[in-house]
Image (cartoon, grey):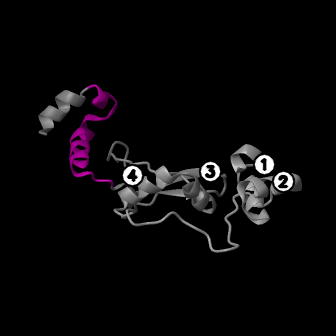
Amino acid sequence: MEYKQFLQIHQHQLAGIPENLWEPLFQKLGQDLFDAGEYLELHYGDPLDKYSLHVKKEGGLKKHGDIFLIDHAWTIKPETARAQLLDNPQMVMRLCSMMDISVEDEEEETFAEGEVYNKHPDLVVDQTMVELVAAQGNVSVERAQVALQNENGDLIAAL
């Protein structure tokens, strides 16, 4: 696509962007150039328990001096990443596709005997419910307890 055609097609979308950034935007879109990481970085926590954006380019950024493309794939806390991926196979497939990782021959993750992943280890669940899940699900008491904890005590979801 030529720059003039880009302007004709996207003129309404460009209305809120300074005109000096239209051509750099066109070039970045054409090249899939995601260079924000060279200028910016995300920080988590301290002083707030959330993400904040920080300039890492020496000398800072100039107002209306550049435009960045952001491809937001996934926002996580490192301590919950594994649990989120275990619960969301579509996200695993998307991330594998983005990173060009073949999953054709990969088997579903399994745990060694006795090894279980627990998202909510501090959640106390009723022992009767644990035994019910173990019996109905034909799993060990330990796996039944973890299933209930992972499902926040929801008996049906744990089964």
Dot placed on the residue nearer the N-terminal end, 1 or 2: 2
Residue under circle 4?
A: 61
**Image quadrant assignment for residue 10:** top left
Name which residue lies at 76% across and 46% down.
155
- In the rendering, at what x and y percent does residue 134 appear? 77, 58
In the picture provided, is 88 more to the left or to the right than 112?
A: left
> The magenta stretch spans which residues?
12-34
Along the line of sight, the residue nearer the viewer: 81 or 105? 105
Dot placed on the residue nearer the N-terminal end, 4 or 3: 3
* For the residues bearing labels 1 and 2, Cβ distance under 8 angstroms: yes
The residue carrying pointer 1 sits among few (fewer than 14), some (14 to 19) or many (20 or more) residues within 10 Å by Cα, namely: some
Dot label at residue 125: 2
- In the rendering, at what x and y percent does residue 54 appear? 50, 55
* For the residues bearing labels 4 and 1, Cβ distance under 8 angstroms: no
Q: Is residue 52 above or below residue 109?
A: above
* For the residues bearing labels 2 and 4, Cβ distance under 8 angstroms: no
Give the SS element for disc 4: loop
Dot label at residue 153: 1
**Image quadrant assignment for residue 124:** bottom right
- In the rendering, at what x and y percent does residue 45 appear? 63, 56
Residue under circle 3?
A: 50
Q: Is residue 38 magenta?
A: no
